[in-house]
Amino acid sequence: MRLSNRNKASVYNFINTLLFMILAGGITGFFLEESRFNILGQESYLLIIIPVVLLGIFYLSGRQIFEYDSDGEALNFKNRNIIPFLDRPLSDEFPKYKLLKYEIVQLLFFKRLYITISSKNSGSTMLKYEISYLTKKEVNDLKFSLNKVVKANNEKKLLNNK
């Protein structure tokens, strides 16, 4: 199964540009308010605070683009930001049999996917991906696919233990 929200990159770029334009307009409005008009008084700081909060929520929600591929014998996860220099993109590929469990955590605007895989050195390793920008249907499809892989791995373990 393949899952990707890469086709929404143009929407995220538009939102990013719009938020920066609102911030630039807010800064301009703030300086005009302070130097010329003086109508708003202390509320003029909201012209800067509100756009900064909106930008903060946009970036703290995590990497916007998430790609998942479970076709074949390997699981492939990619997670990147629309602005390449903001942070390093994540890209992991490992065989399906190494997947032990997964967990999806939701807090307000944030959704994270925690994947636990078996590792020779430390026993298990946890990988985390930001999936805040996936729709509910995409998250459900991801859960279904990962459940299928975990179930197959558990059945293989039971057969090998007998």
Image (cartoon, rainbow, N blue to C red):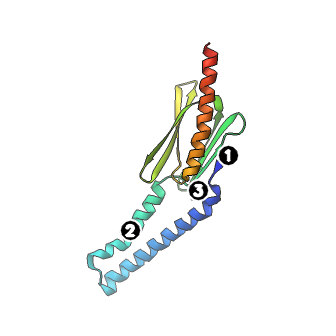
Badge 1 marks a residue whose secondary structure is strand
Note whether 6 is above or below 104 in the view shown.
Answer: below
Task: From the image, state whether disc 3 or disc 2 is nearer to you.
Answer: 2
Query: Which residue is found at the position 67% from the left and 46% from the top?
Result: 2
x%, y% of residue 123? 53, 24
Task: From the image, state whether disc 3 or disc 1 is nearer to you.
Answer: 1
Badge 2 marks a residue whose secondary structure is helix
Q: Where does label 2 land, which residue?
A: 50
Q: Where does label 3 land, which residue?
A: 84
Note whether 153 is above or below 23 in the view shown.
Answer: above
Distance CA(mark 2)–CA(mark 1): 37 Å
Q: Sequence-wise, which precedes: disc 3 or disc 2?
A: 2
Q: Which mark is residue 2?
A: 1
Q: Tag 3: residue type?
A: Pro
Q: For the view shown, which residue lies furthest in the right direction?
A: 72
Badge 3 marks a residue whose secondary structure is loop
Query: Which residue is found at the position 33% from the left and 84% from the top?
Result: 35
Q: Are marks 3 and 2 in contact (CB under 8 Å)?
A: no
Q: Sequence-wise, which precedes: disc 3 or disc 1?
A: 1
Q: Tag 1: residue type?
A: Arg
Task: From the image, state whether disc 2 or disc 1 is nearer to you.
Answer: 1
Q: Tag 2: residue type?
A: Ile
x%, y% of residue 87? 53, 52
Question: In which quadrant will I find the N terminus?
Answer: top right
Question: In which quadrant will I find the C terminus?
Answer: top right
Q: Sequence-wise, which precedes: disc 2 or disc 1?
A: 1
